[in-house]
Amino acid sequence: MNPFRSLAMEAAAAAILLVLLLSPPRAEAHNITRILAGHPSLSTFNHYLTLTHLATEINRRLTITVLAVDNAAMSNLLAKHYSLGTIKNILSLHVLVDYFGTKKVHQLTDRTTSTSTLFQASGSAPGTAGYVNITDLKGGKVAFGSAETGELNAVFVKSVEEHPYNISVLEISQVLSSPEAEAPTAAPSQLNLTAILRKQGCKAFADLITSSGADSTFQENIDGGLTVFCTPDSVVTAFMPKYKNLTAAQKTSFILFHGVPVYQSLQGLKSSNGLMNTLATDGASKYDFTVQNNGDVVTLKTDAGKSTITGTVIDESPLIVFKIDKFLLPKELFKASDAPAPKKKSSKDAAADSPDASSPDGQPSDQTAADSNFARKSVAGVRQLAGAVMCLCLSVALL
């Protein structure tokens, strides 16, 4: 093996080891929906965390505690026919913005504490309404209640899952009582998707939603949460020859492929690599795409192509609309050959990339000699660098 390459590899390995030793531990990402999915008795609670978009907020935070209640307790809550906004306030009172595992709730200083919740963080909770009291009672019982009323109306049942000090999910006996959280909330303003798109540079895409018959499906999903990916007018114009070749049913599926039946913030997309179902999904065809992230760049991929998010058109929960640079191409309707082909290099560019292009006066032997001389002069320097890095790594490891 070339001695220069060997020494360079040693230096690189030593540098990587040093970075690993000095890097602080990273908090693991969590997914509350996935955690609760393994507990059927908590399925209703899990469903409403998604429906109210609290799941996204929980997953976004590095340190969190969720006080879950079983299906029977949720049935009692739903029997009161609260609006979705009120249910969100009530459930946000069950999400503590601090870590409380089983050990911590049984070893509280002074046997009691008060902690803030997502209800408090929302700005909708006046005074102490957004705080929860936790008290370690006699006999090993731990009670929970809203600080607003001072009543401890729920008790600790069991630990569902704990990842210190990232996320803790504890089951409590019943829904916490809070007059402020239970107060009626204003109905969300009626959001007209196509009207919004027409005002924000996606008029041609809005016209396709209407002409394909997909508009009713989009509108019906807004209240429960909806994410839409639209293309600017210039992209629609360039794509029309392919679009016109689709059948009426295929046009509808193609447009619905650009909608996801859940509110997904940009931050949520950046932390949710993997498959994502769309409004076009049915029993026979999945119609999904893959979210991939590279820093701040979010890419949506299928087997037939990929698109990049270029901006946000509107972010008004429960609706969010992103602008993308290309149409999303479902593999059920398009083949990989339908994706734009990469730009071919010209003969001039190819010549510039040739190894011999940099040889002066057409004499590669002179360049080879120069490279060899440079390598010999660099060996000593690289050897010293590798030794210094290895010594530093060993020093850190012994601390």
Image (cartoon, grey):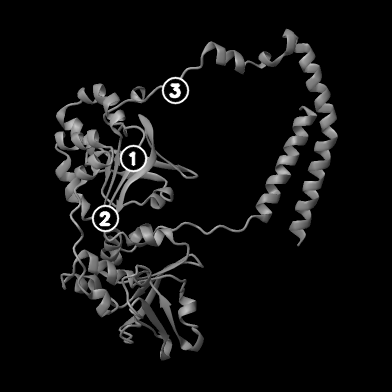
Q: Who's the residue at 28% across and 61% down the image?
A: 52
Q: Position of residue 213 (x, y in %)?
A: 14, 37
Q: Nearer the viewer, mark 1 or mark 3?
A: 1
Question: Is disc 2 placed on a helix, strand or loop?
Answer: loop
In three-dimensional space, the C-alpha distance between marks 2 and 1, rounded to whole angstroms, equals: 17 Å
Horizontal and vertical percent position of residue 127: 35, 80
Q: Which residue is mark 1?
A: 323
- Type of amino acid at the residue the image marks with label 2: Pro
Dividing the picture into quadrants, the one containing residue 48 is: bottom left
Question: Label 2 belongs to which residue?
Answer: 318
Considering the image in quadrants, where does the C terminus appear?
A: bottom right
Q: Amino acid at mark 3?
A: Pro
Of pointers 1 and 3, the one earlier in the residue sequence: 1
Question: Pointer 3: what residue?
Answer: 342
Q: Quadrant of residue 13?
A: top right
How far apart, in angstroms, are the residues tagged by discs 3 and 2?
Answer: 37 Å
Element at label 1: strand
* Nearest-to-viewer mark from 3 and 2: 2
- The answer to whether residue 280 is visible is no
279 vs 305, left or right, is: left
Q: Residue at x 22, y 75 (%)?
A: 183
**Which of the 4 image quadrants contains residue 45?**
bottom left
Q: Earlier in the sequence, mark 2 or mark 1?
A: 2
Q: CA distance from mark 1 to mark 3?
A: 22 Å
Front disc: 2 or 1: 1
Answer above or below: position of 272 versus 119. above
